[in-house]
Amino acid sequence: MIIAGFNQAIGMAEVASEHGDMVDHFLEMVHWVMGILFIGWTTFLIFVLLRFNKKANPKARYEGMTSHFSTHVEIGVVIVEVVLLLGFAFPLWAARTEGIPTGDDVVKIRAVGEQFRWTFHYAGSDGKMGLTDFTQVNPSNGIGLVKQDPNAQDDFISLGELIIPLGQKVIVQVTSKDVIHGLAPIPLMTQQDAIPGREIPMWFTATKTGEWDVVCAQLCGAGHANMVSSVKVMPKEEFDEWLAGQTPMFPPAAQ
C-alpha cells in the first residue's frame, strides 16, 4: 500500500494489463536504486567539497586518493546494474517478444499510423485478417485492404478508437503509412514503434475496464501533439456485441 501510494503521488500510470505489474515493479526497482545512488553520490560530493577544499588543504597533494573506497562503490553499482539488466530487463523483453499467443480466441488487430491519426483494422467475425496492399490506398480505403481477398470481406476499421475485450489476449500488428510513429496505450504498459513497410506485433491482456488515451511515442511532425486516440476495454459480452454490429469495409451490397 505504501509503494502504491508513492507511485500514485509521483504520477506513475495506472496499470490495466496482465503483464503491467511486472513492468511497474521493474520501474519501481530502477527508481529506488537511482534514488539511493543519488543520495549516495550527493553525500560523497559534499564530503569531498568539505574535506578537500582549499582552506583545509592550502597545499595541493599530487598523489591523489589513496583509498579504494570509491572503486569498490563503483564496482557495486556496476553489479547492481548488471543484475537489473540480465535478471529483469532481458527476461521481461524476451517474454514480450517470444511469447506471442496463438489460437482462435486471440483478437487480431492492425494499427496503422499516419500523420496525424491511428486507424485500427479488425479481422471481423472470421478472425482472419484480410490482405492489405498500400498501392490500393485511396480516400475510401485508407488501409489498402484488398477487396478480392476472401478474408477481407468482413474486415472493418475503427478510426481513432482501439476497442478490446477484457481478459482476452489481443495481438496488434503495428505499421505506418508515412513516417515512424509509436503506438503507446499507456495503462496497458506497452509501446511499439510503427515503421513504414513493416508490421511489428505487440500483445497484451487487459485486466481492467475503462477508457484511456493512446499517444504517439515518436516525434512524427508538426501535429505530433494532436495525434491522440483512445483505447477502450469492455467486458467480452459487450465487445462481441460491438463486433457484430460493425459494418464491413466491403459490405455485400457494394461487391
Image (cartoon, rainbow, N blue to C red):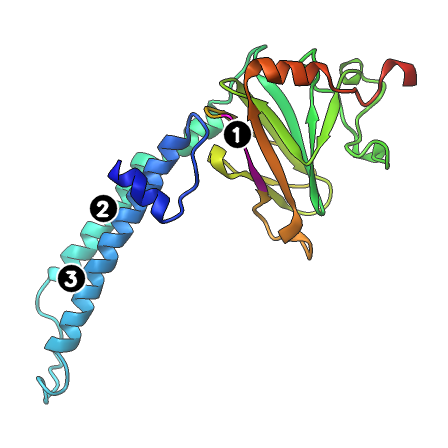
Q: Which of the two discs, 2 and 1, labels the residue nearer the N terminus?
A: 2
Q: Quadrant of residue 242?
A: top right
Residue 213 magenta: yes
Q: Which residue is mark 3?
A: 70
Q: Which residue is mark 2?
A: 79
Relative depth, front residue between 160 and 75: 160
Placement of 118 over or under 54, stated as above or below: above
Task: Specify start and end residues of the magenta stretch as a single range.
Answer: 209-214
Residue at the location (9% across, 85% down)?
57
Residue type, mark 3 in image: Ser
> Gap in Å between the C-alphas at discs 3 and 2?
14 Å
Nearer the observer: mark 2 or 1; the answer is 1
Q: Position of residue 25 (x, y in %)?
A: 32, 36
Q: Which of the two discs, 1 and 3, labels the residue nearer the N terminus?
A: 3
The numbered dot on residue 210 is: 1
Q: Position of residue 248 (x, y in %)?
A: 79, 20
> Crowding near pointer 3: few (<14 within 10 Å), some, many (20+)?
few
Residue type, mark 1 in image: Gly
